[in-house]
Amino acid sequence: MRACFGLALVPALVMSLLLSTSLVAFFVGIVGIVVIVPGEAEALVPRVERVINAVAAANRSGRRVSALRFKLNLHIGEGPPVAIGELVTHPTGLARLELRASGGLVERHILLGNQHSAARNARVLVRPREFLPPLFVLQSNSGAVLEAALSTLGIDGDIVGLAPCGKYDCFVIGDPERAVTRPGMPPVAKPVIDESDTRREKAPSLWVDTDDFNVRQIESMSGAKIVLGPYVSFERLSVPQWWSIEEAGKRVVRFEVDSVVEVNAPAAAFSKAWLMTPDHETVPGAPGAEERLPSTNREIPVSEVVPTLPAVSSPGPGYREHPDDDLAPEDGEWLADPGADGASRQ
């Protein structure tokens, strides 16, 4: 009986030993993780210079490191397209955008690094919407060029963190609240970030996909949030299919890409003179309208479309500023042309 009882205990003892070993191994593993993660968290996030170099490599792989011209449709909120646009962006930090809506209304934006100017029907917009995002960060062909671009945008290129961005995981360059503490750096107790707190001042930052190192989001110094959609191919160019722009107190706008091509874009194509040239006027030496808006499928380089424009030292006759910068007035008329008293003409 004792022998039988002893034999019966053998499997139980063996099982107990195995379970104990497994539990010990399990807890050792857990303890190992707990011990390793605080000390080795930086291993999960590459050093910022590696992330920056990887972004530049992704830009080169996407073949978008030259000047590009986008044909766009503009949506406000969830509504249908309200305007067509043409955006030209250069890797050196120059960009321009022309929007055309019904009624012959034209709005133009110029971006020179971090200096943004805009005019509607050749009238300066005092507080323009951020309709012209710094897409040149998608065109930097080297880490050094991208670092310079980040500096221009006020983004601290020395810090990097990790955060979710929509359905992606992103490395976040420039946000100290998300920065990873490296060996030798003093530990900092950081408060939990409340993403829903719109009053929280956010540092300008660049959000990069952890898988393919494409830029997914840009947060500007003014607080605007630019979200880039999935990257798709137009011939040999890989660019976002769309991007949206969120500004506090404004309706979200969304630009959808119809086409994109490489162009020759000299510095003269980004002159502020172009910004202030009335749409109906012809600049001396410029092609006629039928040449500027060809019916053929040939893509004309920007150097042909936009000649070197004369410098504008002072506003021309009829110039005036108007503060109505909202491209979606409450009356629903997009790009409503204000009258002399500031009221919109219907």
Image: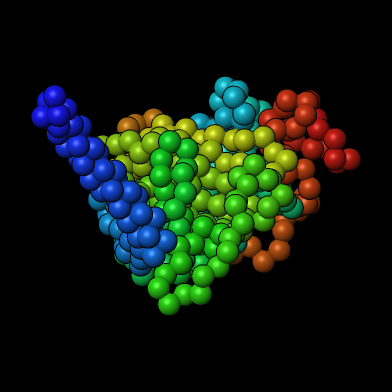
Tell me: residue 161, above or below residue 263: below
Identify whether 332 is placed above or below 164.
Answer: above
Counting from the top left corner in percent of width and height, residue 304 is at 39, 50
Residue 220 seen by the camera: yes
Labels in figure, total: 0
Note whether 136 is above or below 74 in the view shown: below
Which image quadrant for residue 100? top right
At x 38%, y 47%, the residue is: 209
User: Residue 92: x and y, percent?
Assistant: 42, 63
Model colouring: rainbow
The residue lying at 42 percent from left, 61 percent from top is 38
Residue 249 found in image quarter: top right
Identify which residue, 85 or 183, lies in the foreground.
Answer: 183
The residue positioned 55% from the left and 52% from the top of the image is 219
Of residues 162 and 299, the one nearer the viewer is: 162
The residue sitting at the right extreme is 341
Task: Check the picture and name the quadrant holding the N terminus.
Answer: top left
Residue 5 as seen in the image, left or right of residue 88: left
